[in-house]
Amino acid sequence: MAEILTDSDADLDLAAGTLRAGALVAIPTETVYGLAANAFCEAAVRQIFAVKSRPFIDPLIVHVHSLEQAGTLADISHPFVKRLAEAFWPGPLTLVLPKKKIVPDLVTAGHPTVAIRMPAHPVARKILQRADLPLAAPSANQFGYVSPTTAQHVQDSLGDRLRYIVDGGRCDCGVESAIVLVGDNPVLLRPGVISRERLEACLGVPVALGKGLMETAADKGMLAPGLLKKHYSPRTRVELFEGVPAEENAAGTAVVWQRRPADPGAGTLSKNVFWLSEDGDQTTVARNIFEFLRRLDGMGFSKIYIERSPDGGIGTAVNDRLSRAAAKL
Ligand code: AMP
Ligand code: MG
């Protein structure tokens, strides 16, 4: 099992020193927990792929402590970079930018662009500052499984393959960052809690919805069919519903509502009924979704039946993850 580190100065120094020495450390961010390595060190980055069983064609996001540091990795001259960074950094927004030579091809899966984010989580920021290295960090879980939002989730998934996990509490956002391909015609490659609507308001131009790199690769036949369509998936089968579930009372089926359903009488809601929030608030739903998937996955249900979020805003990010969790291979 991995050793759980705290946010004490001594533990943060240990985490930063471990990263500087070319080893992996799982770190908290405001989106999900990340499996971090020195982005400049190919051997360290290679370990990320090995530990996660992640295919090399899936590029990593590099985490930085400042816009200036981003400028050492990528061309940040497009005016939208400064505008987005001023509005949303530090925070759950990743920018895809033309890469500089210094970034290993392994990090970008051979692409001429690199994905960069400045996280807001205070512990992530301290580690980035102490290590003073850009950190490549995908979610700290087995490739394809549900992303971790607590240190214990990381321990459950990868504890036997890791030395250290830094505990920074529960992740505030609960889903991965929004990813924007920066250019005159920006493209949202992955929805997150920073919604397309907010990005458009910031930039004053339309932000197209685009396919992520892996979906594009799947379309081109570079991947086994559905490999990335199916992602964020518990072992238990997931199905989605809108309105009324078809089999609310089927034994063995967990029914998960967006908001607390009306209780027909004191405590008579059945044991297989759950809700992602009290009132349908999508910030709360996003924060809870992966934790619910993990918890329900361990409860022996034969099916997890989940109500879709309303589309738009953060709901779009939740539905993106839900539809991938529900996708069949
Ligand atoms: P994660 O696995 O949550 O760390 O997210 C990594 C994802 O970021 C990848 O699966 C891609 O969808 C996206 N990404 C990373 N680098 C690039 C890039 N250079 N161009 C486009 N998308 C990227
Ligand atoms: Mg991931």
Image (cartoon, grey):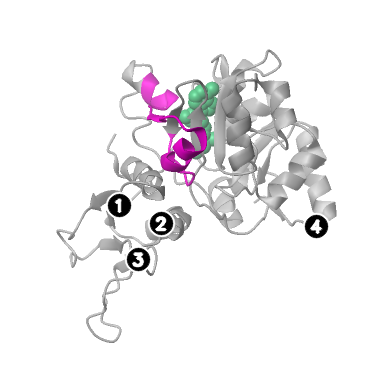
Residue 110 in the image: state x and y as whole percent. Answer: 55, 14
Identify the mark nearer the N-term, 2 or 4.
4
Residue type at tag 2? Gln
* Residue 54 x/y as whole percent: 51, 30
Per the rendered image, the range of residues in magenta is 190-217
Q: Please, what secondary structure does the residue beneath circle 1 have?
A: loop
Quadrant location of residue 219?
top left
Q: Residue at x 29, y 68 (%)?
A: 272
Evaluate if marks 1 and 2 touch, with contact meaning CB atoms under 8 Å apart. yes
Q: CA distance from mark 3 to mark 4?
A: 35 Å
- Between the residue at mark 1 and the residue at mark 4, the CA separation in whole angstroms equals 41 Å
Say the numbered circle drawn on residue 310: 1
Placement of the C terminus among the 4 image quadrants:
top left
Mark 3 in CB contact with mark 1 (< 8 angstroms): no
Q: Earlier in the sequence, mark 1 or mark 4?
A: 4
Q: Residues within 10 Å of mark 4 (few under 14, many from 20)?
A: few
Inspect this view and state whether residue 297 appears. yes
Residue denoted by label 3: 275
Which kind of residue does numbered mark 1 sit on?
Answer: Pro
Q: In this view of the protein, which residue sits in the foreground, 173 or 79?
A: 79
Amino acid type of the residue that numbered disc 3 sits on in the rendered structure: Trp
Q: Which residue is mark 4?
A: 8
Question: Earlier along the polypeptide chain: callout 1 or callout 2?
Answer: 2
Q: Distance of mark 3 from mark 1, alpha carbons?
A: 15 Å
Query: Closer to the camera: disc 3 or disc 1?
Result: 1
